[in-house]
Image (cartoon, rainbow, N blue to C red):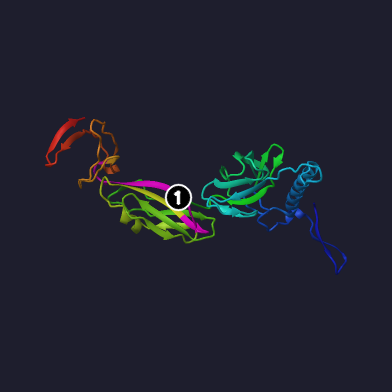
Amino acid sequence: MSVLKHYDSSKQKWVTDAPNAKDVELNDPHFVNANGTPVSASDGFNTVGNKLNLVDKEISWLYHNKGEGGTGGTTETVYTLALYETDGSILSDGNTIYTSSDSVNLQVLISGGSTSKTFTIHVVSSGSTIGTYSIQSLSKSTITIKGLGQSNNLEIYAVSGESQTVSRYINVVSGAIKITTISKPNQTIYTNSIIRPASFQVTNNTGKPATFHLECVGMDSYTTPVDGSYVTISSDVMTTYIQKIPGNRYYFTVYATAELNGQEYISNKITFNVAVVDATKLTLLLDGITTSPDGNMTDFIYGQNVSFLYYLSYANAAKNLYTVQYKIYDISSSGVETQIGTT
């Protein structure tokens, strides 16, 4: 199709609306590309034509195989395909599902016949099959569709031998909410340095308000509404978590959430840690063993090797050649320290 026209009854003639139908976009969610952008009027009519050709073939098959019944003929069993969300809500053609990842779980049910039959579910996106799944009819099964783009118009149908269900059409928006790092505090900070703020970008495709979450192991979490697309955690907030005590280490997790139709969507999670070192002295940082002297010590099984990670850190002004000696002490209940080893 090269020209888009309409008939003007007052002029009693056809009037050109667009010299090229490919320059006209269809403002309809059923006609979009894999990336969610509208298709042209020309491509849209081609899609409708292809679907009509498929329906014509299905009707022809039913007629020639006596699917419509008839005197003295056998009636071919008609199978239907139903799609459901994981909460049991049925999906109609054109419905949109949101997911936080690049995959989605669907429940499928094939009805028809009196005995169970094996079907292959085909999932098609932009004309290409992106997944096939073997299921049994007459009972609900869960399939996981992976490798989705941001916006996906899916055609789903089932085949078993010469039996084929009518296609179902849904749209899946993956990555409904996600978070990326813009900046964060240095992994190692000195006792005399300023703690940098942390900044993150939240992409929210749900159309609903989002909430940012910051969690630190052993401490209360921090939440704030996402105003726009960016969230900045000020130095003051970070300072409430990071105490400048040499040897301390803090483990953070950030993510975003949004609620849509009573369901909470959780973004990917970003983790980072911050260690505090002395600005002028050698600092020993440990991971996997308690460092606080408050009596909350790390337990090891008797006879088990004692292992933990460590590294030494020092400011540039304090660089030197160090000879490190490790001394291991047993602290009895009376508080007496007894050296039990040296390396």
Q: Position of residue 326 (x, y in %)?
A: 21, 33
Q: Is residue 124 left or right of residue 47?
A: left
30 and 53: which one is in front?
Answer: 53
Dot 1 corresponds to which residue? 181
Q: Is residue 152 visible?
A: no
Residue at image x 18%, y 31%? 341
Chief SS of the magenta region: strand
The magenta-colored residue range is 257-284
Quadrant of the drawing holding the C terminus: top left
Disc 1 is placed on an element classified as strand
Q: Position of residue 166 (x, y in %)?
A: 69, 47
Camera-nearest residue between 182 and 160: 160
Residue 282 part of the magenta-drawn span? yes
Along the viewing direction, whichever of 206 and 284 lies nearer the viewer: 206
Give x and y (percent) for residue 99: 53, 50
Based on the picture, tell me whether residue 261 belongs to the magenta stretch.
Answer: yes
Q: Which amino acid does label 1 sit on?
A: Thr
